[in-house]
Every structure is written in C-alpha cells, then in structure tokens.
Amino acid sequence: GTATSLPKAPTSPWVSFPMLFDAIRDKVPAKDMEVINMHYLDFKSKKMTRADLVKKLRVIVGDALLGATITGLQRKVLSS
C-alpha cells in the first residue's frame, strides 16, 4: 500500500501539530522526530501543504499511534 491508498487522515481543530508532536515524542525514535520536525518546518514555510505533512506523518508514525494520540489529546482538551 502506498500513502494514497490509506483512508482519510484523522483531523481535528482541537489538536495543534506542536501539541501532537510533544505527545508522540517519547513513542517515536529520535531520528523519526528529526524528520517530522524538518517536514513541519517545510510546512510552516509553505514548502509543503498540510495534506502532504499529514501524509508524511502517517507514513512515519502510523495511523494507529496517530489516531490514539489525537483521541487522547482531544479527550484531555475537552475535559479541561
């Protein structure tokens, strides 16, 4: 499967990328976090679209971890 065959990425107005990255930092190898941070800088400097950043995140981190982390963060935000 390629990134294009994956189901739609989970999205939420509640979870910022920095909040998400902070939450996955301890669950992802340091080298992967370096790559994620480089992609994020490209996104912030308009060299990459949000959709492309999300695709890359899904490939690096995986849908299961991303989904679980976003759900957990949403619960935290909603309960505070």
Image: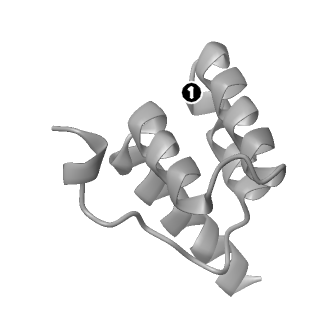
* Image coloring type: one colour
Q: Position of residue 2 (x, y in %)?
A: 23, 39
Q: Nearer the viewer, residue 79 or 53?
A: 53
Q: Position of residue 64 (x, y in %)?
A: 34, 48
Q: Nearer the viewer, residue 74 or 46?
A: 46
Q: Residue at x 57, y 77 (%)?
A: 12
Q: Position of residue 33 (x, y in %)?
A: 67, 27
- Side of 54 where 50 appears, left or right: right
Q: Residues within 10 Å of mark 1 (few under 14, many from 20)?
A: some
Q: Is residue 59 shown above or below 70?
A: above
Dot 1 corresponds to which residue? Answer: 28
Q: Residue at x 62, y 57 (%)?
A: 49
Query: What's the amino acid at mark 1?
Result: Val
In this view, which residue lies farthest toward the top? 31
The quadrant the C terminus occupies is bottom right
- Side of 5 where 3 appears, left or right: right
In this view, which residue lies farthest toward the front? 47
The quadrant the N terminus occupies is top left
Q: Residue at x 80, y 41 (%)?
A: 41
Q: Is residue 35 shown above or below 48?
A: above
- Helix, strand or loop under label 1: loop
